Image: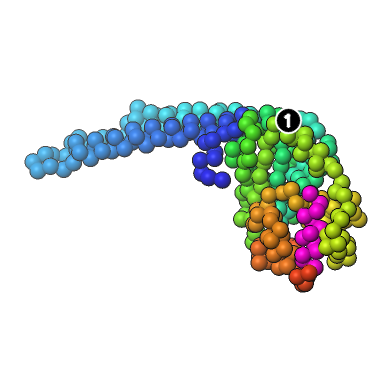
Amino acid sequence: MTALDTLNAISPQADAISRLFVGVLTVLGLIFAVVAVLVTFAVLRYREKPGVQLPRQIYGSHRLELTWTAIPILLLVGIFVFTVKVMHAARPPEDVRAPDILVVGHQWWWEVNYLKSGIVTANELHIPVGQRLLIRLESADVIHDFWVPRLGPKLDAIPGHPGYLWLEADQAGTYRGACAEFCGAEHAWMRLEVIAQPQDEFAAWEQAQLAVPAAPTSAQALAGMKLFAERTCVNCHRLAGTSADQRVGPDLTHLADRRFLAGGAALNTPSNLAQWLKDPNSIKPDSRMPNFQFSDAEVAALVAYLESTK
Ligand code: CUA
């Protein structure tokens, strides 16, 4: 994400916000220019010079007072009307229709549930290009804030109070987002990515996600599968086709397909995954993932297993 993302809109919602930003900035810039020119003129023209007397002093002028009261009021009314219009363009009305995707903010990662297909993933949202999806936003713990600057407005995820957001991208691409509300120690590692794909690519992704991973074949991965069930991974995670069906931590069904681990704190490579299993705090201090004191062989087995679930 860069500061310019806001100006580089890829959806009608973000475009409306970008126009509002540029519009207000232009008005403010013009006011600044007018004031700067008048002040400079006054300083140069009316400064104290030898032999020149003080000019006539004016105390109170209804016309001037009215002018400098009316102009800001008119400007603020204009900005207000423009802002309300943009709010309507950028945000769906409450309960406009059934949501497509449920996003839940957790300390410190995003749970993503596709409500129609049943796919569950984490920290990345695949969407078909050019389709307007309705996101329902919730929080599992504290207040988070969902923000993908190039695609739309920020929206707080407030515990017990769901919010709604349009999500749409007019061009294929990967759009970075982040949690935009301080939510604890690892707030900075609560990133997400929206991957907008052409319809056929999106359908292929959906098919791949819906597939239940086949049981592993290598001895090492089989050992990892056993460890996964025995070493309490199953108490917090879900992995389709196994007994693991908890939602405390991210769904691990197709973990190997994801680009990041730990809310963006590390790229999802086998070596980073091993490091994460060995000592989660070395990648993300204060992470809710416990350190299970796995031996190197156990870590290698678990990595082999999780990589096999692609
Ligand atoms: Cu979640 Cu900041």
Assess disc 1: are there few (<14), some (14-19) or many (≥20) residues with their C-alpha within 10 Å of its C-alpha.
some
x%, y% of residue 289? 75, 63
Give the magenta-colored segment's residue range.
298-310
Q: Which residue reaches farthest right?
A: 243
x%, y% of residue 119? 81, 42
Q: Quadrant of residue 67?
A: top left
Indicate the quadrant containing the N terminus: top left, top right, bottom left or bottom right: top right
x%, y% of residue 198? 70, 31
Q: Residue at x 76, y 51 (%)?
A: 255
Name the one closer to the observer, 150 or 58: 150
Magenta span main SS: helix
x%, y% of residue 306? 79, 56
Q: Quadrant of residue 263?
A: bottom right
Find disc 1 in the rendering and name its residue: 199
Q: Residue at x 34, y 30 (%)?
A: 64
Name the one closer to the observer, 190 or 130: 130
Question: What's the image's color scheme?
Answer: rainbow
Disc 1 secondary structure class: helix
Q: Quadrant of residue 80?
A: top right
Residue kind at label 1, given as amino acid type: Gln
Can residue 111 be found in the magenta stretch? Answer: no
